[in-house]
Amino acid sequence: MNEAFTWSLVDEYIEDRLIPRDPALDEALDANRQADLPPIDVSAAQGKLLQLFARMAGAKRILEIGTLGGYSTIWMARALPEDGTLVTLELDPRHAAVAVANAARAGLDRVVDVRVGPALEQLAELDAEGAAPFDLIFIDADKPNNPAYLTWALRFSRPGTVIVGDNVVREGAVIERHSTDPRVQGVRAFFDLLAQEPRISATAIQTVGSKGYDGFMIGIVNG
């Protein structure tokens, strides 16, 4: 049996056993497809994993760098208490509009703050506003800027903050040090920064599933 086909079937099995169908999440994916957004949302199993990270961290404040249509946003926001906040940053105004509508449809518009524009500019604005530390930070935007996003994530952290980075294996291309792909080099620089940064303890896991072969970085900010 084809490996990728098997991975997708196993994801379907996991979702069938452990992740009940959710109309708001299904509608968000439908809205993303209808708006012709890139089909690069996390899988349902990965979304549930992010939600569990948020619950484990007791998160009241979440920062997401890279919104797309807000599918992962909804997963994480549902882990927040009523007075919680999720700030999510999206470059493309059209994508952001879809995310705002999806969050509203899920009843999360008072919890989710979608900010539009280049993420590095939005992060600087958050800093100028004196934003309080976040409990969970999910980095899932343009990979060449991953090192800069990590630097900002640490700035917006406190001891115990959980930082997660998506797409850090890239079908194994991360080990290709001479790669000409700026996304690969961005992820490699991200790992280099993690390796020398004493403020965070991190690991990475390889993943397979309906989204193919990739991986997550998972770290916790040291006390």
Image (cartoon, rainbow, N blue to C red):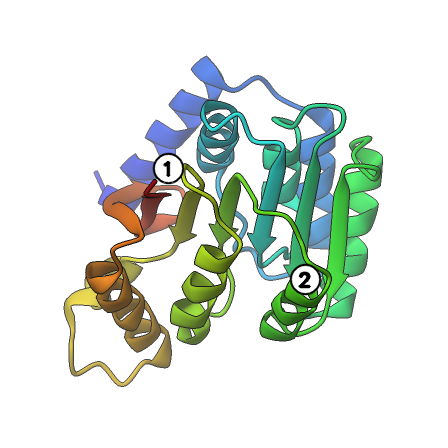
Picture residue at 28% right of the left edge, 36% below the top: 6
Mark nearer the viewer, 1 or 2: 2
Asked whether, in this view, residue 192 is left or right of residue 59, the answer is left
Mark 1 / mark 2, whichever is N-terminal: 1
| Residue designated by label 2 | 126
Q: Quadrant of residue 197?
A: bottom left
Residue 178 drawn above or below residue 118: below
| Image quarter hosting the N terminus | top left
Q: Quadrant of residue 12?
A: top left
Q: Under tag 2, what secondary structure?
A: helix
Asked whether, in this view, residue 120 is left or right of residue 201, the answer is right
The amino acid type found where label 1 is placed reads Ser
The amino acid type found where label 2 is placed reads Leu
Q: Residues within 10 Å of mark 2 (few under 14, many from 20)?
A: some
Task: Depth check: give the residue in front, 26 or 60.
Answer: 60
Where is residue 10 shown, x and y percent of the image?
A: 33, 28
